[in-house]
């Protein structure tokens, strides 16, 4: 059954509009709090957020809901999503919450939920929470004497900084590297420059002055052009671009060329494979990852396991198959030796370690394969089911036939925005463009006809 509130990465939408209202956030706190109560001890939740203006509204609403359910709330303030996943275990909490819409503009917001093990919730648990949102959950709330308390926690940034540094060998230093880090005016604006500097790098931080409405605005992992310009301007060795909640990363080399999540996964997988650290004989990626990554891994006698879009599904497959490297082309990179979710900064540190060990320019170290021509276009929709119409089905079937066995076609609704994403890849770039354009036109015509 289709979910009403949850998408591919928690609950997300326009702030102060359904489903991202204060009322629903309070009910999420109530329902999640009741779902994770276990035994008679004082239950606790860790609650982090990024730098969006609407974070204040959502945070206070969630606190009300959790306290009403009898849970004590530990307020972390602006902090990366992977730090919440780490702290839910470190602080022995029953549940972790991150208020963020990741790479979306400031006017969106979202709620991501983590279980006591630090992993994002399964579809089953999300379904159980969702079923409670439209019911009278007040009937099961805490008695007056059992209501929860809320308090701000000091030192959480220091905990995460030390955690991130420990993902590299103690002997590893980044001295001699000049690094530009684009903090996306988001949750990592304090911790990311600190980690890099404490590891010995010369750090140039940009987009590190959040004001509540500039998060991801022409910056961060979805807009790496300004990072490339800064790398060129200050003659840096490499650039790092995080997104608003720092669970994804893309990088640029000294020439300004973008290093996406596929290239990052390829580099780390090869490095770990050579040292015997890679587990499971492969990597997990999504249906959107480039065919070039699959061919590169196959040449190393490694498998590429593909799953549907969403780092949660990447992690589920990694856990099921015993793999420790996975991620998405967009820059979610999950290294399960260190973290239970995507961690942009930790992934970047592994890349920097490879650059230091090889003592070569980033442009030589980080381009592991030539990407197969791939084109992704988005079609904005406002309801209906255009993918179910006969003209669109016919266009898709024709596109698959034209691409044949040497190409791939992926059409899917976005789980976080009102978009249909159309992606094709094959060795013939002109063919790819033609196939995508024909399907996009069919969807647009169907939408207009509706």
Image: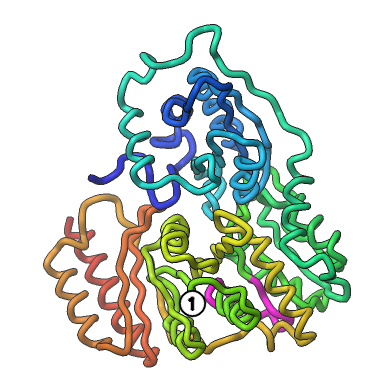
Q: Identify which residue is drawn at 48% across, 9% down.
A: 143
Residue 80 in the image, given as x and y percentages of width and height: 64, 49
Please tell me whether residue 254 belongs to the stretch shown in magenta. Answer: yes
Residue 397 in the image, given as x and y percentages of width and height: 18, 77
Looking at the image, which is closer to me, 216 or 289?
289
Q: In this view, does 214 lie above or below 438?
A: above
Looking at the image, which is closer to me, 204 or 377?
204
Q: How many labels does the image show?
A: 1
Q: Mark yes or no: residue 420 visible.
A: yes
Q: Identify which residue is drawn at 60% across, 56% down.
A: 339
Q: How crowded is mark 1: few (under 14 residues within 10 Å), some or many (20 or more)?
A: some
Looking at the image, which is closer to me, 134 or 429?
134
Q: Identify which residue is drawn at 61% across, 69% down.
A: 250
Please tell me whether residue 160 belongs to the stretch shown in magenta. Answer: no
Specify the quadrant of the image occupied by residue 405. bottom left
Query: As drawn, is 386 to the left or to the right of 73?
Result: left
Specify the quadrant of the image occupied by residue 410. bottom left
Query: As drawn, is 332 to the left or to the right of 77?
Result: left
Write down the residue under mark 1: 281
- The residue sitting at the top extreme is 144
Give the secondary structure at mark 1.
Answer: loop
Task: Give the quarter of the figure containing the C terminus.
Answer: bottom left
- Magenta span of residues: 251-262
Q: Identify which residue is drawn at 48% across, 90% down.
A: 299
Q: Mark yes or no: residue 216 visible.
A: no
Q: Is residue 14 above or below residue 179?
A: above
Residue 284 in the image, given as x and y percentages of width and height: 46, 69
Residue 225 in the image, given as x and y percentages of width and height: 64, 71
Task: Give the quarter of the figure containing the N terminus.
Answer: top left
Query: As drawn, is 210 to the left or to the right of 245?
Result: right
Q: In this view, does 49 lie above or below 230?
A: above
């Amino acid at each position: 059954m289709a979910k009403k509130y949850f998408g591919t990465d928690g609950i997300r939408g326009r702030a102060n509009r359904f489903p991202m209202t204060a009322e629903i956030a309070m009910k999420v706190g109530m329902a999640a709090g009741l779902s994770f109560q276990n035994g008679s001890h004082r239950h606790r939740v860790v609650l982090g957020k990024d730098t969006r203006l609407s974070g204040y509204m959502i945070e206070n609403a969630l606190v009300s809901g959790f306290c009403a359910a009898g849970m004590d709330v530990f307020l972390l303030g602006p902090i990366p999503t992977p730090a919440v996943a780490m702290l839910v275990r470190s602080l022995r909490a029953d549940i972790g919450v991150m208020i963020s819409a990741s790479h979306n503009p400031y006017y969106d917001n979202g709620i991501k939920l983590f279980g006591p093990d630090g992993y994002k919730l399964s579809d089953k648990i999300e379904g159980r929470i969702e079923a409670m949102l439209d019911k009278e959950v007040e009937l099961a709330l805490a008695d007056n004497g059992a209501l929860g308390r809320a308090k701000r926690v000091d030192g959480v940034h220091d905990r995460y900084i030390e955690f991130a540094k420990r993902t590299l060998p103690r002997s590893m230093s980044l001295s001699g590297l000049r690094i530009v880090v684009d903090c996306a005016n988001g949750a990592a604006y304090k911790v990311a420059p600190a980690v890099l500097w404490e590891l010995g790098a010369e750090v140039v931080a940009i987009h590190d002055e959040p004001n509540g409405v500039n998060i991801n605005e022409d910056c961060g992992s979805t807009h790496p052009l300004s990072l490339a310009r800064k790398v060129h301007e200050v003659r840096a060795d490499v650039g790092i671009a995080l997104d608003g909640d720092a669970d994804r990363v893309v990088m640029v080399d000294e020439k300004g060329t973008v290093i996406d999540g596929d290239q990052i996964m390829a580099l780390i997988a090869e490095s770990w494979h050579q040292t015997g650290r890679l587990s499971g004989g492969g990597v997990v990626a999504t249906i959107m990852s480039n065919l070039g990554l699959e061919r590169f891994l196959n040449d190393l006698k490694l498998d590429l396991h593909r799953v549907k879009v969403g780092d949660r599904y990447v992690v589920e497959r990694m856990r099921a198959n015993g793999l420790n490297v996975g991620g998405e082309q967009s820059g979610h990179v999950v290294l399960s030796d260190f973290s239970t979710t995507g961690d942009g900064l930790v992934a970047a540190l592994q890349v920097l370690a490879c650059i230091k060990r090889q003592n070569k320019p980033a442009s030589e170290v980080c381009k592991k394969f030539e990407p197969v021509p791939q084109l992704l276009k988005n079609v904005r929709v406002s309801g209906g089911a255009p993918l179910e119409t006969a003209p669109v089905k016919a266009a898709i079937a024709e596109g698959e036939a034209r691409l044949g066995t040497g190409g791939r076609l992926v059409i899917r609704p976005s789980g976080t925005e009102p978009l249909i994403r159309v992606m094709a890849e094959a060795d013939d770039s002109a063919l790819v463009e033609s196939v995508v354009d024909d399907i996009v036109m069919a969807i647009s015509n169907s939408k207009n006809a509706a």
